[in-house]
Amino acid sequence: MVRRRKQNKSLVTLIIAVGLVLLSWTAFGRKIGLDEWLNQGHQTQTSHVENDEYTPDRQLAESVMSASVRQRLGQKIEWNGHGAFIIDDNRNDLNADVSSAPYAVNRKENGAMIGDAWLNRTTRQYRNRSETGQGRTDWRPDGFRQKLNLSGRYSHAYDRGHLLAYALVGGLKGFDASESNPDNIATQTAWANEAQSADSTGQNYYEGLVRKALDQNEQVRYRVTDLFEEGNLVPSGAHIEAKSKSGSLEFNVFVPNVQKGIEINYRTGCLGQPASQRVVFYCSLLHKNDIF
């Protein structure tokens, strides 16, 4: 009987010890995650792999940063380590002290396409495109020479890239936020348009910051400028700026219009494989199934 009690006591002691180890391991793991979040380092193993596999490296991102593009961006241009560039310490000259109804306009200026807006929660669109009659379209912007069945996360080359996104301005009466508005749509790579994590900062990531601000009843001045080299059909990238009236949100960034695994002829939109010694651009007529 005494021996059995000792065995039971040993078993309980072992269970408690294992529990303490697991608790310590969990707490340590949570602390590391919290520290990383607080420091905004985003240097976890997962994000590192994501950057390597999907996010443009600095060399690729800088391939569109010609002297003329740099001149139009700002005095200070810094690589953010996640596919894009921070301009002038994330500060911009937008005037967010506005007392007017929300608006959204498109214009062309010095060869650039510009989307300029004053947004609030009423401009947000939460409904699906199919519900608002602004769904999928076969219209294509200049240079949209699609290529499908690519390897990797982004299986296609191009999207119809909005300057002013449907989710931000789709609730604004009178503004055409569809995918067939030639003043608000340009040819944009899938990565530049869709990437939305802090480790892969495509345009959707920055639009997400504005969406969250609007959802919190902020008022936001917002401007997107697609920059083109002279004579090109495909923009070099999107210069994106935002500033909230309260001052809680402000950024000034450039998202390069690039994507791993493809090489773009920005003059025509033709595509090639950069790994090959001899690039053969994809410029054949599109089949019906190639329209995306």
Image (cartoon, rainbow, N blue to C red):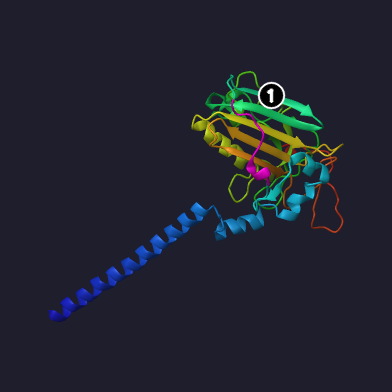
Q: Position of residue 279 (x, y in %)?
A: 85, 53
Q: Position of residue 286 (x, y in %)?
A: 80, 38
Residue at 76 percent of width and 31 percent of height: 113
Front residue (pair 111, 268): 111
Give the vertical position of 150 relative to 207 (above or below).
below
Front residue (pair 287, 60): 60
The C terminus lies in quadrant: top right
Left or right of residue 261: residue 130: left
Front residue (pair 163, 11): 163
**Residue type pointed to by label 1:** Val
Quick check: is 87 in the magenta stretch?
yes
The N terminus lies in quadrant: bottom left
Left or right of residue 286: residue 20: left
Q: Is residue 172 visible?
A: yes
Secondary element under disc 1, as helix, strand or loop, is strand
Q: Magenta residues, as a range?
A: 86-97
Residue matched to label 1: 105
Residue at 79 percent of width and 29 percent of height: 109
Quick check: is 260 in the magenta stretch?
no
Q: Position of residue 123 (x, y in %)?
A: 57, 25
Give the vertical position of 119 relative to 68 (above or below).
above
Residue at 75 percent of width and 52 percent of height: 60
Residue at 80 percent of width and 34 percent of height: 142
Left or right of residue 64: residue 253: left
